[in-house]
Amino acid sequence: MPAIATPALAADPPQPGGGPLPRTLVLVGLMGAGKTSIGRRLATAMDATFVDADDEIVAAAGMTIPDIFALYGEPSFRALERKVVARLLEQPPMVLALGGGAFIDPETRARVKEKAISVWLRADLDTLVARTARKKGTRPLLDRGDPRDILARLMDERYPIYAEADYTVDTTDEAHDAVVERVRALLPPATKEA
C-alpha cells in the first residue's frame, strides 16, 4: 500500500494568550463526543490555543480525511495521524482534540501519557448517533454500514482504551459550557489557573 506523501506539516500553532498551559490538554473520545466544540470553548476559557488534530492532518496531506481513506486506506491515514500528533505534542502546550482513533494507537497513547493531560469525553450511543448524523459524508468509518451498529462496535472496542485517559467526563446534549466547567473542575490547580 503506498504511503501518503507528506508535504511540510502545517505551521506551528500560535502561542496561547496570557500564560501557556503547563502541559497540553488532550481530548479523546469517539466521533460525535464533542471534542472539537468543547475543545474550542475550553481553550477560550483557559486562554489557550485550540488545535484539532484532524485539521492538521488535512493540512499535512493536502486532502480531506475521506479522500485519504479512499485513496490510501486507513493504515496510511493512521500512520500520518501518528506523525502529526507526535509533532503537535512537541509544540507549546495547547488544547488538542484528537480524532477518534488516534488514542487507540499504542505509540500515540504513550506519547500522550508522557507529554500531556488527557480527558476522555464519554458519550452514550444515542448521543453519538444524533451528533454524527449531522455531518454525514465526513466520517469515513460510518460510511461502511449502519452508523448505529458501527458506533456500538467502536464503543465496545475503544471505550476500554479511552478509559486509560487521565480523566473521564460524560457528555450528553447539555450545553457545552457545562461540560467545559466539569473538565476544568477535574484538572490540577496549576492547569486550571493557566
Image (tube, rainbow, N blue to C red):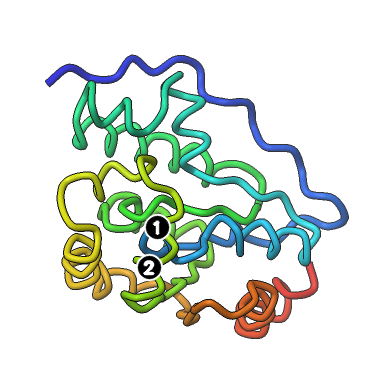
Task: Report the label total.
Answer: 2
Above or below: residue 57 compared with residue 27: above
Q: Which mark is residue 132?
A: 1
In 3D space, how far apart are the residues under numbered discs 2 and 1 (Cα atoms)? 6 Å
Image quadrant holding the N terminus, namely top left
Above or below: residue 41 compared with residue 59: below
- Label 2: few (<14), some (14–19) or many (≥20) C-alpha neighbours in 10 Å: many
Occupied quadrant, residue 20? bottom right
Which residue: 25% across, 55% down? 106
For this rendering, which residue is in front, 182 or 85? Answer: 182
Residue 52 screen position, x and y as percent: 55, 46
Q: Which residue is mark 2?
A: 128
Occupied quadrant, residue 69? top left
2 and 1 marks in contact (CB < 8 Å)? yes
For this rendering, which residue is in front, 16 or 182? Answer: 182
Above or below: residue 103 compared with residue 179: above
Above or below: residue 188 compared with residue 31: below
For this rendering, which residue is in front, 60 or 154? Answer: 154
Which residue: 50% across, 62% down? 27
User: Identity of the amino acid at label 2?
Assistant: Leu
Image quadrant holding the C terminus, namely bottom right
Residue 114 screen position, x and y as percent: 44, 59
Residue 41 screen position, x and y as percent: 70, 62
Which residue: 65% across, 76% down? 175
Which residue: 49% across, 43% down? 53
Occupied quadrant, residue 47? bottom right
Residue 158 screen position, x and y as percent: 24, 66
User: Identity of the amino acid at label 1?
Assistant: Thr
